[in-house]
Amino acid sequence: MAEEKKKRTINRLKTMYPLRALVDGMYEKAVEASQAGKPVAWCMVNWWGGDVILRTMDVAAIYPEDYGAVCAAFGAAPDYLSRSDSDGFPTHMCGYARNCLGYAAKMQDLGEIPPRAPMKGMPKPTLLLGSGYFCDTRYKWFQALGRYMDAPLWVLEMPHPGVKESRQDGARARDINLLVAELRNFVAFVEKLLGKKMDWDRLGELVDDAIEMNRAWHEVNELRKAEPCPMHSRDFWSSMPASLYMAADPKVTAGLYRNMYDEVKSMAASRTGAIAEEKYRLAFAELPPWHSLGFFNQLAERGWNFVTESWAYHPPRPIDLSNISDPLERIANLTYQYFSGYFEDAFESKDWWGYFAHPYVEMVREYQCDGIVLHPLLTCRTATNHLMVVQDQLMKRLKVPSLIIEGDIVDLNLFDPMDALRKAETFEETMNHFRKVRADEGLLW
Amino acid sequence: MAYFMGIDIGSGTSKGVITKDGEFLAHHLVPSGINYREAAEKLRKGLLTVSGLSPQDITFTVATGQGSGNVSFSDEQATDTRCCARGIKHLFPSVRTVIDVQAQSSQVIRLNESGQVTNFAVSERCAAGSGRFLEVIANVLQIELKDFGPLSLKSSNPVTFSTGCAVFGESEAVSRVAEGIPKEDILAGVHKALANKISALTDRVGLKMDCAISGGGGLDIGLIKSIEEELGVKLLVPAQPRSVTAFGAALIAAEPKPA
Amino acid sequence: MTEAGLSRAREIYQDRSRRARELRAEGKKVIGYLDIFPVLEMLTAMDLYPYRLLGDINEPVTKADACLPPVVCPFLRSVLDLGLKGRYDFLDGVAMAHGCEVGEKMAHIWQIYLNPTYAYYLDTPHTTHEAALKHHTELLRGFQSSLESFTGEKLSAERLEKAIKLHNKQRALVLELYNLRKPDPPLISGAETLQVMVSLMSLPAAEGNELLEQVINEVKQRKDGPAKQPARLLVWGSVMDNAALVEMIESTGANVVMDDTSTGSRAYFPTVEITADPLEGLAERYLAGLNSPRTFRETVLGESNRKDYMTDLENRFAYLRDYAAEWNVNGVILQALRYCDIHGYEVPGIKDYLDSIGLPCIYLEHDYSRAVLEQLRTRVQAFLEIIG
Amino acid sequence: MKPEALPYFAGIDLGSTMTKVVIIDEAGNICARVESHTGAEHRHLANRVMEQALKQADLLFDKITYVVATGYGRINVPFADRQMTELTCHARGVANLFPSVRTALDIGGQDAKGLKIKDGKLVDFVMNDKCAAGTGRFLEVIADTLGLRLEELGEISAKSKNRVKISNTCTVFAQQEITLRLSEGALLEDIIAGLHEAIASRAVGMLRRLKIEADVVFTGGVALNAGVVRAVKENLGLEVLVPEDPLISGALGAAFLGRELVRKALAEGKPLQRSKRRLSEATFFK
């Protein structure tokens, strides 16, 4: 397996480690909080809506989605998965969810955090924060948790921007209103649950910090357009949770992203790449196989540099919200920007396929990729059902080929590195071919 | 004159080809058995015998296939996808799509005029849509794989076979037989199911003419016919479909190597 | 009405699109709709012909692989596959909604690959929060304006009320039909019922109502109904658009007397209340009224003291106990399609609930192909041997 | 030799790989047990095996009061009075052999079953017949590849010091994987041990969907394999009972269920539903 040879073929950024540490800290803080009798929330990633509110109310928030990746990386997942299978949850369902349900079942049996749980484990939650956006799992999963715990659950309702219907007159205002109303009701829900009032000024500050944090993170990723690319996707995945899950005080996180900006910038200046010899620049679509990340080292040895990833894990494009006074409205607009910002040009050109593929086409063009690796997740519909369209559009519009490697985020039995490497070798020939084709058609790279 | 060797260690059969100045000289097949190393050695021996050459005569050897890692005497390894594309290009320069039906899995490969792979899709990691499916059914019906095609062509109404798993397909075949359904209809059913899988794979890479078939599946007229029906095109069939990949490996062996 | 209802239903079931093609030839506009969340009343009111998009378990999926990967709902893959093969070429457009998540993606993939003249994606919230209900009313307004610009006509409250009454009548008739399954033996079999339901989804509302009246009259008087069987079953779960599964179950010595799927009671039982702004009543029915697992219902909405697990199950599944009582059910078959998340997550909970009320059940997972029926047969028979 | 007057009951289990027939008398004594390989031609086979059993019991067919057919080819037994699923019959048969049984695992040629049993009756079950992984066929295919007899696998795997992990679930690909491991020099016993572990963990994983209670009984052709039995015990962390003839539990259960049906009918004074068919007629019916 990939992990066995510990070759340092990818130079990891020094400034990445403190960001990754924030996420470890997130879990430790939650355990401490729960031991001190303080409230803890299990959250679905909700794009700085619910979690900024929880942070203001001093609720320690942790993310079972991220914990699924952690368990996979630490090899703890198989145990939890088989428990959820035993309890009758169909095995084709989300690996993160099955991991979490199995974990919760074991925690219920033991009456405490299961021994050997990675990152000291996820403590029993005071409340659950689900979300209506992206996939059904994101609320069905937490509803199913009722089998193992009686924590109250709020499902944060979200609008659906990014599609042509969201461009009808008045649609944007309507959607923002829904978000604001939902957030306001959620605040009332938490206030009642904790018997304390929301400090609106503090919320305002945190929201601004969150906006700033995302801006800083966005700017880091802009630097990756440099050739050779100074920052590999592995560093992106290690640094992403800090902002996506708001793992710490956003002010602190923003600072760390700025440090990362400096490091990446100086590397770009000295034309230092993330890998020794950048033969191919690739994008990666959807989540990686967390249990087999060493696989990227073997690709790096072949000169594959991964320079960008799916928009959905990137911060929203920077947006100025300073003219909006209500913090909830600022959150709503930031979230709305995340859901629609990557499609603006698609809307202008009335490319309604944009909702799926447009951001990929843009990123592959901007980052001058030779190819994209599509990683269909056998237990995740959301991360998978748009990939064929992406493959199509990249070929039609940019003559950029896709390599499909089936796998899963948690279940390592579904991923076969040997097979993937065999495919990769063949794919190099394909990338070479389309380099020529693009040159002939006068495409940029 | 220069001789080059291509060794394709497949999961069922191992095939070897020797080329002389870029042209086909000799080929040889041995069952892979359960030890790829031994298979490779046997194959080389046989190859050299049939071509009347000695190991020293071989300038460069490329190994491919499932067991390519176990060919001690190879100078280089290449994926079967690349080799298959190269081989077919040499046999049929006009081919842009090749359907490679191997013992364990199927792949559809798009290639350009120089035989480079421009797109490819491999059947998912179970025996669905593979030659193995055919073997298993041949077992149930206790008939030789080679008699498969002719028999299947007799069928007037193929049974619908919508299952993936080859072994599960076996049980389906068993119960059909039990229902007294003629063998040819069952065979035609298997061929239809395979053809469906393959046409789905083909849609994923996009069919561009000309189209050829390679691998063990190229020996089965019944399969070829149903693929042709499914895709609505005529397939080019090489004389030695199973050796195409080994041939391609030998051609790659002759390609100039980057220093 | 001389023509026998059941045989007519069977004909329509076997050749679904015939009527649609006829009426289209006469200039009627046919709009395909997916799942049960597009608001049919609004289509009918605009003199459009709502035609339910369904799959075909007998047609192997070959074309869909190229635009929808194999690891998603096999039913939706089949629907898309049929579309790509031109089996829906008589449609003037499609209306799809956020039923389940893959259904939502389908709405866009359909637009990308089939590029219909008219296509609307109706987002549908996931909760019954007050804000969500308000929002849904506004979403329906968006749907309305898009329909108005497509047809060039205004959708007046009067037209809409008329359509609502028409569809409510259909719902009442469906309930009347289902009541004929209450006697033992039932007057109409599960397979026959499903054929009637699929026919309804293939006809304009008014014609569907006529068919229902014919069927009800015929069934009330028929002498050749199903035989008495030891087991009276309820079938719950993913969409069932083909009678084969029900036929298989009924061939093992059981009568399927009740269902809870999107091609049966789930789609037709809830009626629409006519409100001052008709869209409000529609939003209420289609979001809160439709009892689908895709809509999240917290035990006590927004209450922070969550009730215990069993109370939560009671609130979510008590309607099944009522069905079981009214239709005198002694066994439940939980069937879900592989990769169907919204039903998959429900299974352990619904089993816990049925155990708690002493109603035996079995969970069947299948991949929307005829091939699996034989495997399922053994499971169903064993289940009957257990409860019988 | 039993007195002619007493009625006899036959159970026939038409499995995908093996066909078994058991004949019992009124007292429940086994008068005949026959096992034979199932080919594609079920109908003729069913008759043949039944004839063998009658010969063994020295009986004529009309002395058999009731015939219950089970197993995956049960619909192809023209002379059966009644068909019942292998799940119910196995449960009944196992309960007959081990009255203390609560959970039963049966791994046959083409499927794996988990049975929950209370008071000798089936109350719940799980089943895998979707793919060959975790079934006897898996072992057969691999044994074939390795040129070994099924019976040998157990003893060979006993020698294993460190098991090879078989990561492929699909039988066909596992076969490929194994050849690769062998070529790389892995020891035969380690590979086979890995194989047994793969089957056992899959079967036990399935079994866990039922709340597992002792005693656990393991039947079916695969239960003849000491290596799998060991692996199953390890995975369960429980003792596992294996009958000396693990193949016949289905047919045995079928015979006993036949006796129950007859007794019930007599007790209720109801006419006994019997098929008119004779052993000689090999007409297919569904």
Image (cartoon, rainbow, N blue to C red):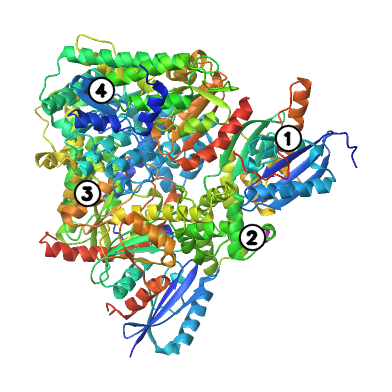
Image location of residue A275, percent across then percent down: 27, 61
Q: Nearer the viewer, residue D127 or A37?
A: D127
The answer to whether A295 appears left or right of A185 in the picture is: right
Q: Quadrant of residue C195?
A: top left
Residue at mark 3: chain = A
**Nearest-to-viewer mark from 1 and 4:** 4
B176 inside magenta stretch: no
User: Marks 1 and 2: same chain?
Assistant: yes
- The answer to whether any part of residue A48 appears in the image is no
Measured Cα–Cα span from mark 2 to mark 4: 65 Å
Magenta segment: D156-160
Instruction: Tell me which amino acid carries mark 2.
Output: Ser
Whether residue D219 sits left or right of residue A205 in the image: it is right
Q: Mark 3 sits on what residue?
A: A260
The residue under the point 51% across, 41% down is A82
Observer-side mark, 3 or 4, equals 4
Q: Residue beneath label 2, please?
A: D160
Q: How many marks?
A: 4
Give the labeled residue for mark 4.
Answer: C39
Where is mark 1, residue-wise? D95
Quadrant where the N terminus of chain C sits is top left
